[in-house]
Amino acid sequence: MSEVVHANKGLTMADVDSKKNYLVTERLVKRFDEALAVDEVNLSIGKGEIFALLGSSGCGKSTLLRMLAGFETPTSGRILLAGQDVAKLAPHERPFNMMFQSYALFPHLDIWENIAFGLKREGLPKSDITQRVGEMLDLVQLAPYAKRKPHQLSGGQQQRVALARSLAKKPKVLLLDEPLGALDKKLREQTQFELVNIIEKVGVTCVMVTHDQEEAMTMAGRIAVMSKGRVLQVGSPKEVYEHPANRFVADFIGNVNLFDGKLSVDEPDHCAVQTAIGEIHVGHGVSGALNMPVAIAVRPEKIEISREKPDVDHNLFSGKVKEIAYFGAHNTFIVKASDGTKVKITEANTSRHDLSKITWEDDVYFWWHDGAGIVLRD
Amino acid sequence: MAIQNMTMPGKRFVISVPFVWLILFFLLPFLILLYISFVDMGNDISPFKPIWDSSTGLLHLKYENYWSIFRAGEGGALFQTLYIEAYVRSLWYALCTAVLCLVIGYPFSYFIARSAPSVRPALLMMVMLPFWTSFLLRVYAWKGILADQGVLNQVFMALGLTNEPLQMLYTDVSMLVGMTYVYLPFMVLPLYANLVKLDPRLLEAAYDLGASPFKAFWLVTVPLSKAGIIAGFMLVFIPSVGEFVIPSLLGGPENIMIGRVVWDEMFTSNNWPRATALAVVMIGLIVVPLAIYYHYTGDAAEPKA
Amino acid sequence: MRPNPKPEADTMKNFLNRHIGKLWLGLTFLFLYLPLFFMIVFSFNSTRQDAVFTGFSLRWYEALTRDTKIVDGFWLSLQVATAAGVASAVLATFAAFVLVRYRRFPGRTLFSGMVNAPLVMPEVVIGLSLLLLMVGVQNAFGWPQRGMLTIVLGHTLLGMAYGMVVIQSRLLEMDRAIEEAAMDLGAKPFQVFFLITMPNILQAIFAAYLLAFTLSFDDVVIAEFLSGPGVNTLPQVIFGYARRGINPTIYAAATLLIVSVTLVVIGYSVWVARQTRRREREIAAATRAEQAALQAQ
């Protein structure tokens, strides 16, 4: 992805800073028999943040979310909400509400009753309940459908009901389990923004779980990338994308080319790594010993490609075009470098005519700016 | 994922209600059954004497109750008793019934499973409908149909198949017809449930690889429906062993089954201990098929280890 | 499953091949329904014979209304079956819930074995062992006398086993997330059960009740073992008549039963079919509306 459209514009880092540590997990562990599903997770989520847990299936994100909701008891560790440990509380005792992936709307109740359900459990007076349900229905624009049953609504409408239901009780934390998973693509794009708008309008702290990077990048203020029960990196979408902490994150988010090699030059403001493809220059220093094994990560969109040799000092390589894919918005080339390494290069289609006219088996040059690559140690 | 956070008192209550019921009305009677099978026949006041002599405090286990099942009188030949005959006959009838039900029922379930989805509910309803009407009445009807002056004989004679009425009632024929008739739905339903879930693409794959429809049936469909076959077979076989009503209505003195024998010992001879011993042996006979049945149907909600 | 591809040539063998399904189904259904047709036809017979139809008559239906034993037995059976049905449904719900929701607890295997056993055990064994229990209790406490209560207990044991299969299957296919959602929204565990779980398995509970009712109404063996003097359920009455010979009054009773059951079953199926169709139409309409809304943008 070369362009990240960011929906979460309302909060500045200063806002988040002042209410940091609203929801904290301390060394949270969950073990199922022999398997370790969540391994010493420490997270610190600020009040009003939209925070995403991103990872592929089996990485522990769902288990983590369920522990926050109270459906799983942690094997060890604490969950703190504004300083209070809530891990021992049952789900119905916690001020958290969850929006389920399958929506889990009560099929035997109509929409109004579905939304009112949580409020009735609190024992609120009827007039308050009616007012609140009305507010929620207006928030998701479903007031005319109040008397319908879930099966009489479309998928998108059901999702909005699920959202309204989970916000009705003004929870301190909103938990979203793969919120857009059940929708088809067109609907998904539209719903991403609507969802964020509503959440920001209400101002609730939100933790969402997803395996879809685009969803996480678009909706969340900060992302925690998870794998095998551990959190590998926490940061804003830009941080995670441009400055991945390790190979896994670099590879997981978007596309990346990884070049393994040994550190050959190490200066405060630049360094160089000797790789199979040649020497790669990086525009920042690393604190490490010479000949240390490292990898250079370069995003495909940051590599330029041409049939004419450009006038560039560093990071210039040559190869043969082996594969081309046309994606409408951009082209992807797979170029086999002189040493045999396959490099993925993406170019935006900025005009309707293919100016570079690069085709299969062409000999090409490719290069990138010193600042485009980053050094990864593991 | 189970809601494991249900408060403990709630969980204990919910488990104990059915558990206590079952222990009181299933386990306890069974233990009493076992107990009585070891006591001596009593006098007029109580049907049996207590198992221990309260004066001497010794246990008097009357193994004779069991021995008399297996050998006739003192020093009599082993396995030559009426009881053994009844057991063997019962097992034989049960086996034949199960096989007949399988032979008739498997193709039947198969064709229903393969029929158009719109027709299937109607067909299933037609299978279940007789089940909802009294089974006693239906067996009774067979009595009329198979009688010497009954409908079937009239038809046979009218068609010239025979000159004299065929003796069908009170024979093995009427027994097996009755038993197969009554137990057929018990074979059809588990088989159907199994067959309807079979992926037709497996058959298509077999055809694609060169198998004829017949071969595909034997090599693909049948093995895959094994669980259904065994469940259905046991569901017919096990209760058939102790069948009581059908031998009473459709069977003669040569077709007596063990269920009837237990009844007679109990209420005609008033020999409660021997009756229970006979019942315990009957249970012993079906324990192995029961284990097989449980193995194949399993605990549907069992935690996967 | 889909029907097999059909062969071409029109020989006898191919005819059989193509129609063997229908033939087999037809013959088997004939076998299943023969006794029913037989009884219906001969319930209108003017004489006692059951091979020759001598003429149309309603005399056996008349005799039926005058037969106090049958009528009394009918009412008793109705009471017993209703009681046993309710008790079975309640217990079956508990048992199904326990087995499906509680993965591990001490004695689970024993519990599972006990609940499922009446499905396969010969009724003679069940009847006998319960009788012994009743006698024992009677000797110890002087109560209960064998009669309606004891029969209800026996039938409940059977009904519970069958009912549990139905409810268990429904519980397994129910979306568990709605229970979690209810808890998440603040419902305590027993509230979850009564407000959310029960309404969604109600149909299965009713089916379990019906099943137990039918089994009870139809049972002979357990009733024979557990009834007391003067207490005779309808099946017991019929059984007594049956051993003595042919009695077309029974055919009349059977016909009434068959007709009413058929009407109920067909009526129910039609109603269910209509509900399903209506639901499908509503879902389709909602999906269409959504597509249209998307395109309009």
Image (cartoon, coloured by chain):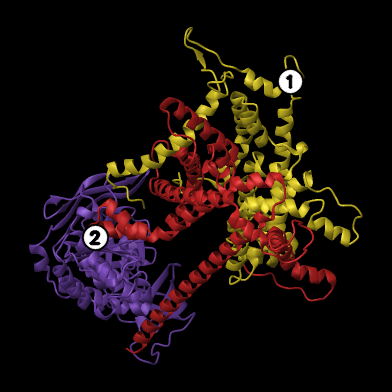
Chain colours: A purple, B yellow, C red
In this image, A316 relative to C223: left or right? left
C266 to the left or right of C156:
right
Look at the numbered discs 1 and 2 and tell me whether their residues touch, using CB distance below 8 Å. no
Quadrant location of the C terminus of chain B? top left
> Disc 2 marks which amino acid?
Leu
Foreground label between 1 and 2 = 1
Q: Nearer the viewer, residue B146 or C163?
A: B146
Q: Residue furthest top?
A: B56
**Horizontal and vertical percent for residue A97?**
23, 61
| Circle 2 Cα neighbour tier, 10 Å, few/some/many (<14 / 14–19 / ≥20) | many
The x, y position of residue C172, in whole percent, is 44, 55
Q: Which chain is home to disc 2? A: C
Q: Quadrant of residue B159?
A: bottom right
Residue B72 is tagged as 1
| Image coordinates for residue C94, horizontal then vertical, percent | 39, 47
- Label 1, label 2: how far apart the Cα atoms are: 72 Å
Q: Residue furthest bottom?
A: A353
Q: Against C243, is A101 above or below?
A: below
Q: Which residue is mark 2?
A: C185
Would you say residue B221 is visible in this rendering? yes
Which residue is at a point 19% across and 61% down the rendered structure image? A173
Please state if B290 lies on the left or on the right of A6 as rendered: right
Determine the residue positioned at 16% across, 52% down: A80
Label 2 SS: loop
Where is residue A126? Give x, y as percent: 16, 67
Q: Considering depth in this image, is C173 or B144 the residue closer to the camera? A: B144
Amino acid at dot 1:
Ala
Judging from the image, mark 1 belongs to the subunit labelled: B
